Image (cartoon, coloured by chain):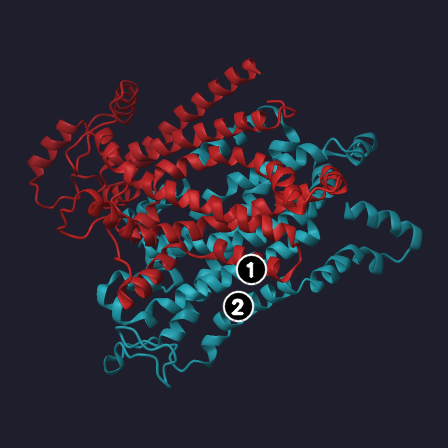
Chain colours: A red, B cyan
Amino acid sequence: MSSYLMKRLGYTLFILLAASLLIFCLYALTPGDFITGNIKLSPERKAELRELYGLNKPLLERYVIWMNNAFHGNFGYSLDKQQPVLKLFNQYVWNSFLLAIVSTFLTWLIAVIIGVIAAYKQYSWFDTFVMVGIFAAMSIPSFFIGLFLIKILAVDFKWLPPGGMLTTGSNATGVAYLKEVIHHMTLPVIVMTLLGVGSLTRYFRSNMIDVIQQDYIRTARAKGLSERKVLFTHALRNALLPAITLVGFELPALFGGSLIIERIFNWPGIGQLYMQSFTVRDYPLLMGFTMFIAVLTVIGTLLSDILYHVADPRVKI
Amino acid sequence: MPSIQAEVTNVATNRPQAVKSSLWRQSIRKLLKNKLAVGGFAVVVFMFLLCFVGPLFSPYTDNKVNMTMMNKAPNIHHWLGTDKLGRDVLTRVMQAGRISLTVGIASMVLSVFIGTLLGAIAGYYRGIVDQVIMRIADLLLTIPSLPLLFIFGALLSEWKVPTDYRMYIVMLILSLVGWPSLARMVRGQLLSLREREFMQATIVLGLRDRRKLVNHLLPNLVPLLIVIATLNIGGAILSESVLSFFGLGVMPPTPTWGNMIDAANNMIDFQERPWLWVPPGFSIFATVIAINIFGDGLRDVLDPKQKR
């Protein structure tokens, strides 16, 4: 196993290195940069700034500089915000994490409960209803449902604020601050939960259906255990275990923010930061963000492979 | 293994026509019993008819700017109202559907083609070819798809691609992002199929590579591919709408469901004129949910092992 792990780690590093080169080239080769987009600058000043930011150097040299700095923990300097990229990330990522952790928790909770009940009553009226609901949740265009709910719940009924994290100009502290944030995050959390709950419910439902048909469930029933005990102690445990491999895949979503949802709800998270920088072509930030997600994805995949082995030692990795 | 079964029974009964189609006919019969899937299929057909035939019955297809009919709420003449140029929204939703559906299907066809080709080559030949193809696929899967789509979209804008051609390039972009996962799956399937007994038989028979691949391996993938292709159309329509909504996909005046929802970025249109952006949103939703339900029904029939 350890030799496998070493090999796997080596490959992971290789892929990340290749990804960094690809990401760099994609952003660097896109015509137009932060400086050309600014019409207020004179040509001389533009040349001067290019020199200053090192944008006039050959491509490969710029890549080597970027990677070298990255290995030293320096992911560049945002041109637009005039702050180190890492500092900006640290500032915004926790807002994204807050949204993601709450909605992920709700998604899993709802998915497990509904998935188990639907599996237990397979082919029933309730199950069909759940299946249609699952497909509906998987088919919603995320930006549209966001806009639609803002229109209904925020604009028409005025129950919830339309966006942001705090009311404009608010300087609430303590409990009032907390209440305000919760009030503002309700709508984005609802949308994110709605978008994620479909596929996960489907996963738990089909897992549970597989487990219920196993011999040990029949044995448990034959022993005369109560149906509740059979379902929750014997079946649910085995149906939940494979799900820990999903934890790894959740990693990019937990810290990477959601480009679309944060944009629609004007939530000051890392996804919104990316979308803002995208319009002004703030490359250090864009590259940093994309690389950040790539690293999270790779670590997540690695983690889920390892967890897969932990969950089921029969699986050799 | 439809081809082999068919061939064997062929010899026995000498009635090629009836026997050849029996597996497919059986599948269709099974599919027809699944009411949900049939319903989904009906909605898909309805959306296609609406978008491709519907505009023929509309008196407003010329998209003439009509200043006297600006921003009218839905009424008896304009069932879904009119937009800021006085164009009929219902007609535009139907015309946008043509583009959105075409982009969805075309990019699906492209990515299934590329994915199957590369996956099959990788899985069949293995060795260095496999290494190269799968490393590229892994690499593309590592980079998050949304930023990747955005970068390509921005490239299109920078290169000043004429709006008429953008639609085709958007198809290309979507398939470029879509093929790696498909190639991986096809490769996995091929790796297990090539160890089966019927493939040993082809080696014993001394068949050429091309014949082994085209006549014996790929037919076994067809059911899986049909299912994946169906479900991919829904995904492609969603991706296209996201891109177009953010102004990086197909651009006006070519309407798509995604760029029609762009009206919601205007504060007044968003709050006061929901008829501009709600109908295209529901069109996307209805189409994609129907495709997903139908695709899942197909999966039950054609590929029950892959159920997840």
Q: Give the tally of numbered discs.
A: 2
Give the answer, above or below, for where A95 lies relative to A123.
Answer: above
The residue positioned 39% from the left and 32% from the top of the image is: A294
Q: Which of label 2 and label 1 is nearer to you?
A: 1
Q: Quadrant of the N terminus of chain B?
A: top right
Question: Which residue is identified by label 1?
Answer: A132
Residue A255 or B147: which is nearer the viewer? A255
The residue positioned 71% from the left and 45% from the top of the image is: B219
Q: Amino acid at mark 2?
A: Phe
Q: Chain of mark 1?
A: A
Evaluate whether label 2 is on the same chain as label 1.
no
Q: Chain of mark 2?
A: B
Left/right of residue A139 with respect to residue B20 in the rendered view? left
Left/right of residue B297 with respect to residue B135 in the rendered view? right
Q: Which circle marks residue B48 in the picture? A: 2
Q: Position of residue B173 (x, y in %)?
A: 42, 47
Q: Amino acid at mark 1?
A: Val
Q: Secondary structure at mark 2?
A: helix
Farthest bottom residue in view: B76
| Residue B102 seen in this snapshot | yes
Label 2 to label 1, Cα distance in Å? 21 Å
Give the answer, above or below, for where A13 lies relative to B52.
Answer: above
Q: Quadrant of the C terminus of chain B?
A: top right
Mark 2, other Cα within 10 Å: few <14 / some 14–19 / many ≥20 = some
| Residue B118 seen in this snapshot | no
The residue positioned 44% from the left and 54% from the top of the image is: B238
Left/right of residue B235 with respect to residue B84 in the rendered view? right
Q: Secondary structure at mark 1?
A: helix
Q: Position of residue B170 (x, y in %)?
A: 41, 51
Farthest right residue in view: B12
Q: Position of residue A152 (x, y in %)?
A: 33, 65
